[in-house]
Amino acid sequence: MDATGYLRDDDAGLELVFERALDEPIDDVWSCFATPEGTAAWIGTWSGEDVTEGSVVTFTMNAEESAEPEQVTVIDCQAPHRLLIELASEAGTWRLRVDLQEVDGCTQIVFAHLLEQGEEIRTIGPGWDYYLDRLVAARTGAPAPDWSDYWPALAEHYLELG
């Protein structure tokens, strides 16, 4: 596995950014982030209101053995192009953004995690590489990746970034 995340300064602060592409229309890829069925295929399940600006849902990751339900607040939703959320958990509050753009039937995904002072980038980076690769596998029919291929193998790359 290769580490794909990179750092970028944004108006909100320093972001850890990942890119993927899927050979699918934007509406199909949007469903991976904005519907319970779509998220269940790669990261977790949620219940609550529809994903709209201001909505709050309860989210539980499905690849974590001891995952607890977490609150997700939708900050910005511009279907099918942008979703900005805050995920509140025991680890703190994470601000996550996904931007989608379709070019010739292929959808470009830019996923960003706003880093807070002191966050452990060497564990966050491999985690997002893993989950985004799970998304690609779920959409393409490829075998699901194995976490042990990501951690600790990719930790050094992210440690050097941070």
Image (tube, rainbow, N blue to C red):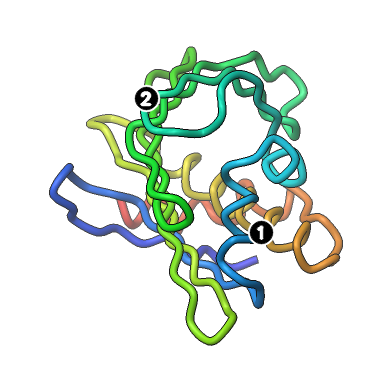
Q: Which residue is at 17% across, 44% downward?
A: 13
Mark 2: amino acid: Gly
Quarter occupied by residue 141: bottom right
Secondary structure of residue under mark 2: loop
Quarter occupied by residue 149: bottom right
Secondary structure of residue under mark 1: helix
**Would you call the spot at circle 1 few (<14 residues within 10 Å), some (14-19), or many (20 or more)?**
many
Q: Say the numbered circle drawn on residue 54.
A: 2
Location of the N terminus (image quadrant): bottom right
| Residue 76 sits above or below residue 67 on the image | below
In primary-sequence order, the first of circles 1 and 2 is 2
Residue closest to the far left: 11
Q: Which residue is at 40% across, 40% downward?
A: 96
Query: Is 162 in front, or is 72?
Result: 72
| Residue 45 sits above or below residue 115 on the image | above
**Would you call the spot at circle 2 few (<14 residues within 10 Å), some (14-19), or many (20 or more)?**
few
- The residue that label 1 is drawn on is 133
Give x and y (percent) for residue 63. 75, 34
Seen in the image, is 147 located left or right of residue 76?
Answer: right
Give x and y (percent) for residue 46. 65, 26
Q: Which residue is at 65% across, 77% downward?
A: 23
Give x and y (percent) for residue 15. 29, 49
Quarter occupied by residue 6: bottom left
Mark 1: amino acid: Asp
